[in-house]
Image (spheres, rainbow, N blue to C red):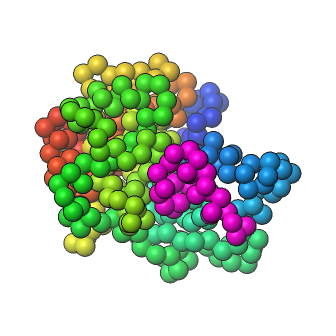
């Protein structure tokens, strides 16, 4: 078991689950990779059809490297009423997050349209624009050292730097694009009156959602918290690495994360959208070691379908942090 590595995607089947860790002891859990192979795939398909003039024989790499690729993506954004936001955040992504012994090791996210890599690891959080995909000589050199040397550090700004008025602290994005998500959000009771007054966008991507809190959002209006609204683990686990490794000017964590539980959690495909603490992968008991208890997912036919409600917020957003604590939602920033 110790020599195995498990790759988890939304398509993970019963063959993979046979090797799923049975013991909650993190030292006995195998190396694990969680991946969302293509997030926002429906948007990506529209983009490819549009830029290729519906010619399905064109190669994806050639289409991505066309000079009008970014312009075409922005046109797709507008057609789908996606609030003209930065392509760095809105573009389709490929993501991989590594978990070892219950701890997040790193996360890598690739924005397919902008050809930008985002890395969160113990050495920091960086972005790097990739060279032309056909330049094998340079692509072979891209490793952790290369990204640290040639990449740019991603800044997650404090709320006091981005908010001009108190209500700015309430601006957020979350997913409401399918049946059940609206009701689930309202059950969170984050905002009792006019719950959607401060909503910026209701169909954000999963892995890249944390980047709404970064400098890439500058110029498009402040976003002061993001919420994973009862979505699958392969949507939200990638954000944990950015919460873990992003630092503020004082060298302290730049982000906090809270897990939301509700009194009567709703279900999606028979799976709880906001599991109570005893069913959480985050350990809550005082005195317990802090790690992700991935063994809890062994009872799911498809472990990737495990769902949670999570809120990620800048470390100094007193308004939202206060709401989280008033509702007795657990801060889990140190649990991975």
Q: Residue at x 37, y 21 (%)?
A: 266
Q: Residue furthest bottom?
A: 149
Q: Is residue 223 above or below residue 155?
A: above
Q: Residue at x 42, y 45 (%)?
A: 201
Q: In terms of image quadrants, where is residue 16?
A: top right
Residue 185 as seen in the image, left or right of residue 153: left
Q: Residue at x 29, y 49 (%)?
A: 171
154 inside magenta stretch = no
The answer to whether one can see residue 149 in this image is: yes
Q: Residue at x 50, y 21 (%)?
A: 269
In the picture, the quarter occupied by the N terminus is: top right
Q: Position of residue 224 (x, y in %)?
A: 29, 54
Q: Position of residue 100 (x, y in %)?
A: 45, 50
77 inside magenta stretch = yes
Q: Position of residue 134 (x, y in %)?
A: 76, 71
Q: Residue furthest right?
A: 57
332 and 220: which one is in front?
220
Q: Is residue 106 above or below residue 149?
A: above
Q: Which residues are magenta?
A: 66-92
198 and 35: which one is in front?
198
144 and 109: which one is in front?
109
Q: In terms of image quadrants, where is residue 296?
A: top left
Q: Is residue 149 above or below residue 201?
A: below
Q: Position of residue 154 (x, y in %)?
A: 41, 69
The answer to whether one can see residue 4 in this image is: no
Residue 87 as seen in the image, left or right of residue 166: right
Q: Is residue 53 above or below residue 287?
A: below
């Amino acid at each position: 078991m110790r020599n195995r590595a498990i790759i988890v995607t939304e398509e993970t089947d019963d063959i993979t689950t046979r090797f799923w860790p049975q013991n909650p002891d993190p030292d006995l859990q195998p190396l694990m990779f969680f991946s969302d192979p293509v997030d926002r795939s429906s948007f990506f398909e529209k983009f490819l059809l549009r830029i290729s003039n519906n010619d399905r024989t064109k190669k994806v790499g050639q289409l991505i490297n066309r000079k009008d690729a970014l312009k075409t993506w922005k046109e797709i954004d507008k057609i789908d009423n996606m609030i003209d936001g930065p392509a760095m955040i809105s573009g389709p992504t490929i993501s991989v997050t590594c978990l070892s012994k219950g701890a997040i090791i790193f996360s890598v996210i690739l924005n397919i349209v902008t050809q930008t890599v985002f890395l969160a690891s113990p050495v920091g959080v960086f972005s790097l624009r990739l060279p032309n995909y056909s330049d094998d000589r340079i692509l072979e050199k891209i490793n952790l050292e290369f990204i640290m040397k040639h990449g740019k550090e991603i800044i997650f700004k404090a709320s006091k730097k981005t908010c001009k008025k108190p209500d700015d602290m309430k601006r957020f994005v979350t997913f409401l694009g399918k049946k059940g998500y609206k009701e689930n959000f309202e059950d969170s009771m984050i905002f009792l009156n006019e719950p959607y007054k401060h909503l910026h966008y209701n169909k954000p991507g999963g892995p890249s959602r944390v980047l709404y809190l970064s400098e890439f959002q500058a110029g498009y209006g402040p976003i002061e918290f993001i919420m994973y609204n009862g979505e699958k683990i392969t949507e939200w686990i990638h954000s944990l690495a950015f919460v873990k490794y992003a630092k503020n000017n004082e060298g302290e964590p730049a982000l906090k994360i809270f897990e939301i539980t509700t009194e009567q959690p709703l279900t999606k495909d028979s799976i709880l959208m906001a599991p109570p603490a005893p069913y959480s992968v985050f350990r809550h008991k005082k005195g317990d070691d802090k790690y992700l208890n991935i063994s809890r997912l062994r009872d799911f036919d498809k472990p990737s379908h495990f769902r949670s409600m999570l809120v990620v917020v800048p470390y100094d957003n007193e308004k939202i942090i206060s709401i989280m604590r008033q509702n007795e939602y657990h801060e889990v920033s140190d649990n991975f």
